[in-house]
Image: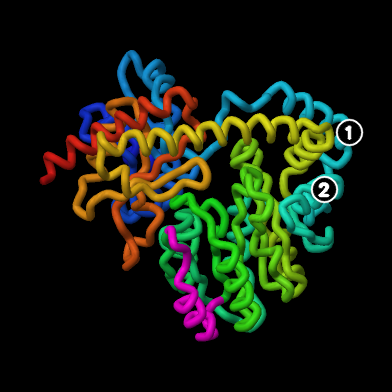
Amino acid sequence: MPSKHSTLAAALRQQIISRARPAGDKLPSIRQMATEQRCSAATVIRAYEQLIAEHYVYVLDRSGYYVAAHGPQQDALQQQMLDLASAAPAAEIFPFADFQSCLNQAMQLYRDQLFTYGMPQGLPALLEEVQQQLAEVQVFAPLSRLYITSGVQQALSILTMMPFPGGRQSVMIEQPGYHLLMELLEALDVPIVQIARTVKGLDLAEVERWFRSGEIKFFYIMPRFHNPLGHSLRHADKKKLVALAARYDVYLVEDDYLADLEQHTNADPLYAHDLSQHVIYLKSYSKMLFPGLRIGAAVLPEPLQASFARYKNLLDIDSSMLSQAALHMYIHNGMFARYWRLLLDAYHRRSRQLHKTLQELVPVCALFADVYHVDAIHAVIPLPAHFPTKALIRQLAEQQLIADSLERYFLPDSPYSWNGLRINVSNVPEERIPTALHTVATQINKLWITSN
């Protein structure tokens, strides 16, 4: 008798072969598929992994599972596809030889530590390097409050599960916001409070109303280069938000995942304005190096340190020592700084090209005139409420473009949800941005005319 995951994989495989699920179609999330099939999440994961191994499905970091192009030309088609969805760094820029050299050095220098446990806060040498990097973005954190984590996702998991002073339970999140945190909160049945985030920022009066209620455990926020909207909070609003957190004793979880791409030296994080230890600062290396490194950093207020350390120790004892040692060598040898300058230049050129092309294509597609302003390397094209966005994404896949809607950035019952197409160019060569966006504009026009 075939296993449950094999049966599910076979059913999905047949749907893909028959083109009931065409190339580029996004598969349901693991949780949704498990609910639909009345099986466990583990069964869905194993089925998806089997289809990935068979090249029927591919996965995009922080996006989901997609149907791969199939047939004799599959590999060639996959290579031709442009990824307008993923926010991962551009692989062609990364100096793999340099990092491999650092891995080899790390294995020699730290070989004794690779066979032991006992550094739950992180490799001391790496902590010192990270401390210096944080100081460059106005985060002056003592080593005692700095923790290395297995990516920002682990830090968020710990903060969600651990108790906070006062016993508050509700977590406030932005809408739109980080979809994996939303899935985590729902999976753990954590009470969620939603707050709208727009290009104008936050409704601080509404934020204060919720803070005053005494229900909020923490408010998770991306003040800089918001994902998916792309913009940053104004300096005055940052200061007001930190003041509200201090007044009502609410913690702010600041996800500063693109801090390294900031061009303006006066664009301080929330942490720089925090005098009462109410800001938890999170830094990611996934968007600068590669997601597989699984290294993040968290700066904890003193009242939260003991609980955070305890829960982290229960989850993984300590983060990957080899990854930490390799990153330490990469930073210490000056390679990170050289690569950072290279990546910064590439991203700035791609961001400028994105701006320029969107403006030039307004006569081709009127909806481009309403595009959300871009501060980083992604933007959102607002679409009419009843526009067939899923059909658009399927048609773009047929044109070898992987695109992303806003659907997963909102909770299913969010009163703030709206329709839009998210565009990210971190993985798109600068010279191919105009052609890719022209294709997007053309396909939007075709569907817009048809749907009207």
Q: Is residue 92 above or below residue 37?
A: above
Residue shown at 36% from the left, 47% from the top:
371
The N terminus, quarter of image? top left
Q: Label 1 to label 2, Cα distance in Å?
A: 13 Å
Please indicate whether residue 174 sits to the left or right of residue 19 in the image. right
Protein image colouring: rainbow
Q: Residue furthest bottom?
A: 213
In the rendered image, is residue 394 in sight? no
Circle 2 Cα neighbour tier, 10 Å, few/some/many (<14 / 14–19 / ≥20): many
Quadrant of the image occupied by residue 120: bottom right
Q: Report the span colored magenta.
A: 199-216
- Label 1, secondary structure: give it: helix
**Residue 239 or residue 145, whichever sits in front:** 239
Q: Is residue 434 above or below residue 245?
A: above
Q: Is residue 231 above or below residue 347?
A: below
Tell me the tag on residue 123: 2
Residue 210 inside the magenta-drawn segment: yes
Residue shown at 45% from the left, 77% from the top:
206
Tell me the tag on residue 78: none
Where is mark 1, residue-wise?
109
Circle 1 Cα neighbour tier, 10 Å, few/some/many (<14 / 14–19 / ≥20): few
Quadrant of the image occupied by residue 98: top right
Residue shown at 27% from the left, 45% from the top:
367
Residue 365, how many percent across, how many down?
A: 25, 38
Kind of residue indicated by mark 1: Leu
